[in-house]
Amino acid sequence: MVTVQVEAHREGDVWVATCPALDVASHGDTREESYRMLEEALAGFFEDCCEHETLLDVLAERGLAPAA
């Protein structure tokens, strides 16, 4: 398990949720929707890394390590 910080802010009429540590972002009409969309984007990010067997390398490049 890896724990990362996420945050959300308004940009005009939309909410933008980001995970700066992984450089992943998404948006929605509400804060809650932006977080749900970010969760989906992060799931896709991790799925892609796993499919390409690059997850540990990607985490290491970003200075992250899986929690024991």
Image (cartoon, rainbow, N blue to C red):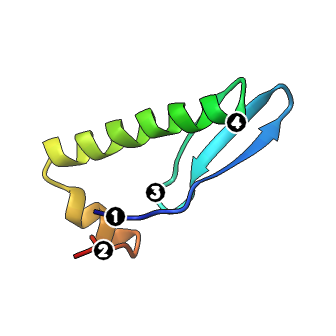
Q: Say whether disc 1 or disc 3 marks the residue closer to the N-terminus.
A: 1
- Circle 3 — which element? loop
Q: Do the residues labelled 1 and 2 touch (CB within 8 Å)?
A: yes
User: From the viewer's perspective, is 16 left or right of 26?
Assistant: right
The answer to which quarter of the image holds residue 10 is top right
- Disc 4 element: helix
Residue 22 is tagged as 3
Mark 2 burial class by Cα count in 10 Å: few <14, some 14-19, many 20+: some
Residue type, mark 1 in image:
Val
Name the residue rendered at 15%, 41% in the picture: 51
Residue denoted by label 4 = 31
Whether label 4 touches label 2, CB < 8 Å:
no
* Crowd tier of the residue under label 4, counting other residues whose Cα lies within 10 Å: few below 14, some 14–19, many 20 or above: some
Q: How far apart are marks 4 and 2 (CA)?
A: 28 Å
Element carrying mark 1: loop
Q: Distance between the residues labelled 3 and 2?
A: 12 Å
Identify the mark nearer the N-term, 1 or 2.
1
